[in-house]
Each structure stands twice: as structure tokens, then as C-alpha cells.
Amino acid sequence: MGGFVRPHHIAWLVCLIPIIAAHGAFFIGLWQGVANECVPYFEGCTSISRAARNGDAIFLFRGLMMPTAAFLIIFWYLQSIWLKQMTQKPHPVVFILGNIGAVFLVLYADFLGTEGDFYEFMRRYGITFYFAMTILAQMLSIRSLKKVKGTLDRKIKRYLSIQFVLIAIYWVLGIANVVIKATGVSWVDQSENIIEWHFALYMSFFFGLTAMMWKRSGFEFQFRINR
């Protein structure tokens, strides 16, 4: 037996679930009175991690981010197949880096809400490598498609250009964060929180754009179940 999977549905899940998890956790915190009332994208009153580990927000956040890690593994597997179809070359590094990022997301979510210096270190270790490995996989995906840009559909080219802009924004945010920390200004924590919220949002947008690229190209994946 066998059937077809609509890959763009997986990509949309990877895009939307983290957005729902982060914002849902923040609003639960507001409802329970354990989160500061502000717009974190502009005021930086809290980080995503702090918003997610206060009150009952952690149950929503963990409950959504753990399956997201599994969807990410599936996503990067499908992405490597799609890239091979588009470029006629295998892309194992994209798959490997994306999966490493997914594993570190599990590590981060698992230690979220725990107390102590060791657990804080593990949370930071997890989220840092999740971001780093995922972004590297995204960059390599864009680089692969840029090499065959002339063969791509017009709309896929447009989505690819937007993804490239997102990567540029990542770098701007990363450099800004380093510079602000180096200056030692009093509002360094707020700026780091603001950058984190924007960074996570734009990283999710990448997956939504990939979903549209997959759908536009007619990408389908057939699976087989042997009995």
C-alpha cells in the first residue's frame, strides 16, 4: 500500500506552530498575571524563554515545540528530496544540519522551566545550536537554488528572493546584537529580547515561503507501507 504526502502541509506546520507556541505562551502569561504587559517586539520586556516558562505557559510551549522538532526532521528530509529534484544534485548536508538543529530544539524545550546554572547553560546551549544549525541549513538551501535560478518558476524565484532578504535580516540582527552587547548599555537585555522575538519570527517565515515554493512546483512525496 502507499499514498501521497502533501509536503507543503508539513512546511506550514513548521512555520506556524512555533509562532503559535511563542505568542500563545506570552498571552497565557498575561492572562495569569505572570508576564509584563508590553509589546515584546518593540519593548523587549521578556524573552521567548522567560515568557514560556512562567505559569502554565510552559505546558503549551513544550506541548507544541516537541512535535515541532519531529516535523522539522520530516521537513528537512523532504527539503533534501525537493532540492535534489530542482538541482539534480543530492544535498545531504542540508538534511544533516537541519536535523542537528531539531535535536537541539528538543534539548532546549526539555530543560525549559528547570532551575539551576547547569540547566540554564543547557537551555542556552540548546537554543543557540538550534538557531545556528537551522539557519545554516536554510542558507545552504538558498545557495543551492541560486545556482539553478534560471530554471526556476517566476513565483519560486520571488519566494527565493524573499528568503534571501530574511537571511540578510538574520545577519543584521546578529551583528546588531553583538555590537549592543559590546557597548554595555543599560538596555542590553531589552535589545536582546527584541532581537530574539524578531529573529524567531523571521526564521519561521522561511518555512512558510518554502511551503509556497513546494506547492508551486507541484512537489509530492509518495510513501509505501508494506504488509
Image: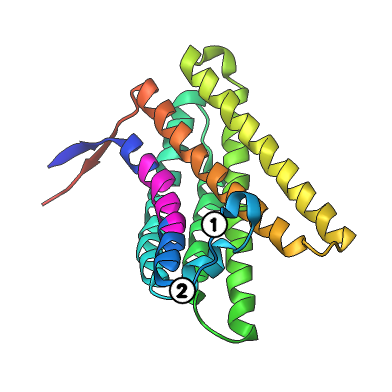
The segment highlighted magenta reads 12-23
Residue at the far bottom: name it.
116
Q: Which amino acid, mark 2?
A: Asp
Colour scheme in use: rainbow
Q: Nearer the viewer, residue 74 or 189?
A: 189
What residue is shown with label 1?
101
Residue 18 shown in magenta: yes
Residue 124 shown in magenta: no
Q: Position of residue 100 (x, y in %)?
A: 54, 58
Q: Which amino acid, mark 1?
A: Gly
Residue for point 78% across, 48% down: 176
Point out which mark residue 15 bears: none
Q: Can residue 130 be seen in the rendering of this structure? A: yes
Q: Secondary structure at mark 2?
A: helix
What residue is shown with label 2?
110
Residue for point 28% across, 35% down: 6
Location of residue 178 (image quadrant): bottom right
Q: Nearer the viewer, residue 80 or 28?
A: 28
